[in-house]
Image: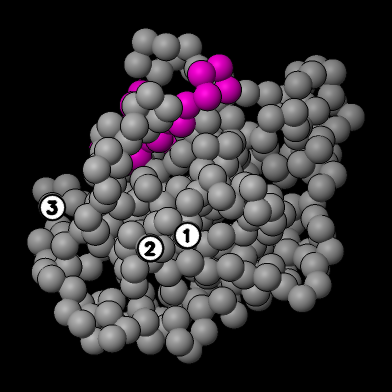
Amino acid sequence: MTQNDRQTPGAQRIALVLGSGGFRGPAHVGVLSRLQELRIPVYAMVGCSVGSLIAAYYAAVGLTVDDLLGHALGTNALGILSHSLSLWLGPERTRLLRRWAGPVRARLELLDRRDFRRLHHGVQMVGFLMHDLRRGERIFAVTGRERGFNLSEAVRASSRLPVLFPALRKEVEGLERRLVDGAFSAPSPVIHAVAAPVSATHVIAVDLTGSRRRAQRSELGRWQALLGDRLMVLRPRPSLALWGSPLGARAWYESGRRSLGTAEAERLRLWLRGETRGHEAVAGGGRPQLPQGHDAPALGRARDSG
């Protein structure tokens, strides 16, 4: 029996969508901390950019919230830049940078022995959005539809910001791809949480985008109109955060925790009881109805290969 077989037909399947955000990523950890505190089961996690890293370390590696926060506090701009240079120039030319790049590389190596199917913390599916620079298409790999990716490849590609990191080159379904940060397709990829094979009934999306233009690519307003009460969009924002510093990481973590306040907690409890905020029954916990042309696996194949 697979993990998916253990889901009853009427169960509420809550997907957590963790979007892009760079050093704002600890906010995702703060949200996870509150979800654990509230005992909200997460059926699936969908990520891109830093959200892919958090999803992978939590669901696939099995790190605790405290572990994730420790990683965030120990990651700084110098370490990321040193790792970036080592990827562009090769290890032989960047020996002097190993001291700073080493911790980042060691954390990434935790992904090498993990896969899409042996998951932790009750999560049953995990997926990562990538963007193909060569064709301008999105590529989505998820539990049960890995598309030839191992977990480490998918996560590394999904979090590679162009210019800072070289694209990951890989043949996918017969085509050579140059894969980078999935945020170039959708900074908060709600579509992949509600479409098959994830088919979540409810979605929590953590939006960390600082740019209106980037936020528009996720179409969160449109998805809110389509899904109504079944989509909860959280927008953590600290009052002050020092970019790339431990104090900044802590501030974003706390803002993530605060974004799930009393009203949001009550709304989640209603979800688990099969109700909306207006106490209108959600029929059988069924999946949201997608507009024509947005169901998986097509997802508009002219521009979307996920």
Spot occupied by residue 59 in the image (x, y as percentages of width and height)? 42, 54
Q: CA distance from mark 3 to mark 2?
A: 31 Å
Q: CA distance from mark 1 to mark 2?
A: 6 Å
Q: Secondary structure at mark 3?
A: helix
The amino acid on which the numbered mark 2 sits, given as a three-letter code, is Ala
Q: Secondary structure at mark 1?
A: helix
Q: Is residue 141 magenta?
A: yes
Asked whether, in this view, residue 49 is left or right of residue 23, the answer is: left
- Using the image, tell me which numbered label, if any, was put on residue 5: 3
Q: Residue at x 80, y 67 (%)?
A: 241
Q: Is residue 14 magenta?
A: no
Which residue in the protein does label 1 denote? 221
The amino acid on which the numbered mark 3 sits, given as a three-letter code, is Asp
User: Visible in this render: residue 112?
Assistant: no
> How many neighbours does mark 2 have within 10 angstroms: few (below 14), some (14-19), or many (20 or more)?
few
Of 72 and 112, nearer the camera is 72
Location of residue 95 with respect to 17 vertically, above or below:
above
Q: Residue at x 38, y 87 (%)?
A: 266
Asked whether, in this view, residue 184 is left or right of residue 268, the answer is: right
- Using the image, tell me which numbered label, if any, was put on residue 125: none
Which residue in the protein does label 2 denote? 225
Spot occupied by residue 218 in the image (x, y as percentages of width and height)? 50, 49
The amino acid on which the numbered mark 1 sits, given as a three-letter code, is Gly
| Quarter of the image that includes the C terminus | top left
Q: Are marks 3 and 2 in contact (CB under 8 Å)?
A: no
Q: Residue at x 52, y 24 (%)?
A: 136
Of 142 and 213, nearer the camera is 213
